[in-house]
Amino acid sequence: MIEFGYARAGSAGDAIGLAGRHAGAKFLGGGTNLVDLMRETIEAPEFLVDVTALSQRIEAREDGGLVIGAAARNTAVAENRAVRERFPVLSRAILAGASGQIRNMASVGGNIMQRTRCLYFYDDAARCNKRCPGSGCDAIDGFNRMHAILGASPSCVATHPSDMCVALAALDAVLVLEGPQGTRRLPMLDFHRLPGGRPDIETALAPGELITAVELPPLSFGTHSAYRKVRDRSSYAFALVSVAAALDVAEGQVRDVRLALGGVAHKPWRALKAEAALRGRPATAESFRAAAEAELADAAPLSQNGFKPELARRTIVAVLEDLA
Ligand code: SF4
């Protein structure tokens, strides 16, 4: 048995103080990923700081935005009326993830911090640069059907597993981070990293920092948004490809659009090339296909996931056609 310490924090300051006083500490939310990693001995924190008592508040701002406490449960966010009315893509993305029981436990902060589900990462007999830097990557020539086609590196081809984060990336979410140096705000798009030569470094979090809230800025056409997840079975499966989109069409032209992809990269993939290709264009299947082609032009599939680029293109087109 591996022993570890445990304390429940009453506030963000309390949590940061506890983590600072215990070497090898980790923050514990709903535990739906970290506890699995500890059981598999992939993670072995010496001390757990339970942050489930921190803010679970979901505040609808008068300007049309939202602030979500990082300890809010995934189910509470998906069911929240303001979330469903202002940003249905976020509610849909959360409901596409995991099972009802897991969504009841999982927190927003923990969902953002969850780690890849690459099989080799969980197998300590396998070579994995993320788990053991410098050891190699068994996925590159192994079972890589679920793996990345965009932004990968020779060190790691893993994907980020979250659905919720794909919607947050599309919605220009901003993370509120608190740590020993104070509070800062970081765009969601800058939080998760591409693997490069250090796939073990997954986020821009500084030592001792904690996600305390997620801010969603107002988006007038956020009401007109959707999430589609393509997977091997209809529930409790990770995405082969997913698409989060919000679309603003006026007189047959795309006035504005937000688009992000899941299941294709080491981080939620904001489809900025496709967005640029769509603004001012007719809201037609031809425009949507051209935008999808632009976004996937640099796709580099592996030995077992050559289907993913076309699956991503078709899913983008289907979601945008529905919204248009
Ligand atoms: Fe490890 Fe990344 Fe390779 Fe998977 S893809 S084995 S997580 S280095």
Image (cartoon, rainbow, N blue to C red):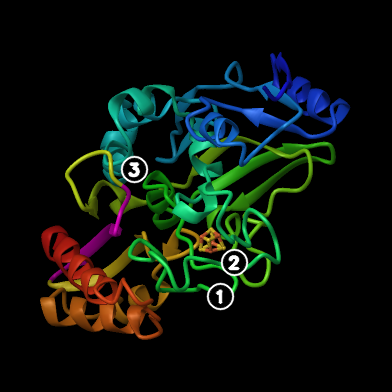
Q: CA distance from mark 2 to mark 1?
A: 6 Å
- Determine whether label 2 and label 1 are within 8 Å by CB: yes
Q: Name the residue that disc number 3 marks.
A: 90
The answer to whether residue 256 is above or below residue 306 is above
Amino acid type at image mark 1 = Ser
Crowd around label 2: few <14 · some 14–19 · many ≥20 (10 Å): many
Crowd around label 1: few <14 · some 14–19 · many ≥20 (10 Å): some
Task: Tell me which numbered mark, 3 or 2, is placed earlier along the sequence.
Answer: 3
The answer to whether residue 106 is above or below residue 146 is above
Task: Tell me which numbered mark, 2 or 1, is placed earlier along the sequence.
Answer: 1
Closest to the observer: 61 or 105? 105
Q: Name the residue that disc number 1 marks.
A: 153
Q: Name the residue that disc number 2 marks.
A: 195
Q: Position of residue 191 (x, y in %)?
A: 60, 54
Residue range in magenta is: 238-251
Discs 3/2, front: 2
- Determine whether label 3 and label 2 are within 8 Å by CB: no
Q: CA distance from mark 1 to mark 3?
A: 29 Å
Q: Residue at x 31, y 44 (%)?
A: 93
Amino acid type at image mark 3 = Leu
Amino acid type at image mark 2 = Pro
Circle 3 SS class: helix
Ligand 1 contact, mark 2 (Cβ < 8 Å): yes
